[in-house]
Amino acid sequence: MHSVRGQDAPFSFRFAAPEAAIEALGLTPDRTKADRAVQAAVIAAAAVEYDGAGRWISYSRSHDWWAAGRYEGTPVTS
């Protein structure tokens, strides 16, 4: 199991992959608008943060972290 390291990139909603990129990866766009927004953000984060050196994109699974409002206003829920 991978643990969060200082050089990991935090997951964010700064970027969104276009639907064409999702389809080019052979993925089916998710059904709801919120699900598609999360899918697009995850794919874009992977593309932006990829550096070829094994960098990971991290997110917390702690309810306390989510409740603190980091993802407030985004379609990610706890």
Image (cartoon, grey):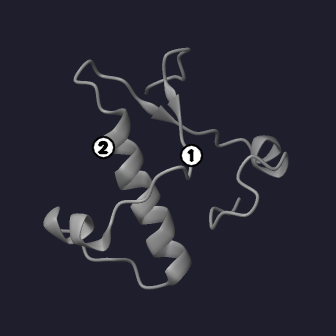
Q: Residue at x 20, y 71 (%)?
A: 23
Residue 35: mark: none
Image coordinates of residue 42 in percent, x first then y, are: 42, 53
For image coordinates 35% across by 60% down, the residue present is 17
Secondary structure category for the residue under label 1: loop
Rendered view: 26 above or below 52: below
Q: Describe the element under mark 2 as helix, strand or loop.
A: helix
What residue does disc 2 label? 47
x and y, in percent, of residue 2 in the image: 44, 25
* Nearest to the observer: residue 59 or residue 40: 40
List the single residue furthest toward the top: 6
Q: Amino acid at mark 1?
A: Ser
Earlier along the polypeptide chain: callout 1 or callout 2?
1
Q: Is residue 60 above or below residue 20?
A: above
Where in the figure is residue 49, as x and y percent of width and height? 37, 34
Horizontal placement of 54 versus 62: left or right?
A: left
Picture coordinates of residue 6, whole percent (x, y) = 56, 14
Q: Quadrant of the C terminus?
A: bottom right
The answer to whether residue 72 is left or right of residue 58 is: right
3D distance between C-alphas at marks 1 and 2:
13 Å
**Residue 21 image-quadrant placement:** bottom left
**In the image shown, does 30 or 12 lie closer to the viewer?**
12
| For residue 1, side relative to residue 13 (left or right) | left
Q: Residue at x 37, y 51 (%)?
A: 44
Q: Looking at the figure, which quarter contains the N terminus? A: top left
- Amino acid type, residue under disc 2 in the picture: Ala
The 10 Å Cα crowd at callout 2, few under 14, some 14 to 19, many 20 or more, is few
Residue drawn at 39 percent across, 78 percent down = 30
Q: Which mark is residue 12?
A: 1
Mark 1 neighbour density, 10 Å: few (under 14) some (14–19) many (20 or more): some
